[in-house]
Structure formats: structure tokens, C-alpha cells
Amino acid sequence: MADSAAGPYALTTGPDGALWFTLVHSGRIGRIVPGQEPTAHRLAPDSGSTVIAFGPDGALWTALGIGALARIAPADSAT
């Protein structure tokens, strides 16, 4: 999923118990569920996502270093 240069940075636990984290240098958000393979969501290249949190809508929100926000819905689709 990611190499050591991808830059794991911010961490949060989702309402589903999964651990979510930013990969600041690769433009991705990673997700780990115990006992499963890690997955990653592709954001904008060089987006520099450094902050993540779950909002009251149950979606994951992240601030991108390119002056934008990204929302990852519970169904795992990034907008």
C-alpha cells in the first residue's frame, strides 16, 4: 500500500473501529481493520493531507495542503 517515504502522519479511529491515517507525501488516506489487508484512498497527487477527523455526518474529513477539503463517505467514496 505505501512505502516508508509516503509519510504516515495523522491518525484517527473511525466509528467502524478502523484506524484511518494520512499518507501525506503520496496523496492518499489509509485504512486498517484488524485482521484485514490495509487499503488506501487516492486523493489529489501532492495534496499533502495532514489532518483527519470524523464529522457529525459520519464521514471522514481531511484538510488538503492544496487549499481544499476532502470527504470520504462511509461507503468509501472520496469527494
Image (cartoon, rainbow, N blue to C red):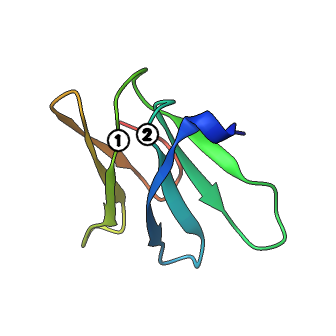
Q: Is residue 73 left or right of residue 56?
A: right
The kind of residue tagged 1 is Ser
The kind of residue tagged 2 is Val
Vertical side of 68 occupied by 31: above or below: below
The residue sitting at the front extreme is 5
Q: Choose the circle earlier in sequence order: 1 or 2.
A: 2
Q: Residue at x 43, y 39 (%)?
A: 24
Q: Position of residue 23 (x, y in %)?
A: 50, 43
Report which residue position mark 1 lands on: 49
Where the N terminus falls, by quadrant?
top right
Where residue 64 sits, quadrant-wise, is: top left
Vertical side of 29 occupied by 11: above or below: below
Pointer 1 with pointer 2, Cβ within 8 A: yes
Cα separation between marks 1 and 2 = 5 Å
For numbered disc 1, what is the local secondary structure? Answer: loop
Where the C terminus falls, by quadrant?
top left
Vertical side of 22 occupied by 60: above or below: below
In the foreground, 17 or 26: 26
Q: Which mark is residue 60?
A: none
Q: Residue at x 58, y 79 (%)?
A: 17
For numbered disc 2, what is the local secondary structure? Answer: loop
Q: Is residue 69 left or right of residue 54?
A: left
Q: Which mark is residue 24?
A: 2
Q: Residue at x 60, y 71 (%)?
A: 18
Where residue 4 sits, quadrant-wise, is: top right
Q: Is residue 75 left or right of residue 49?
A: right
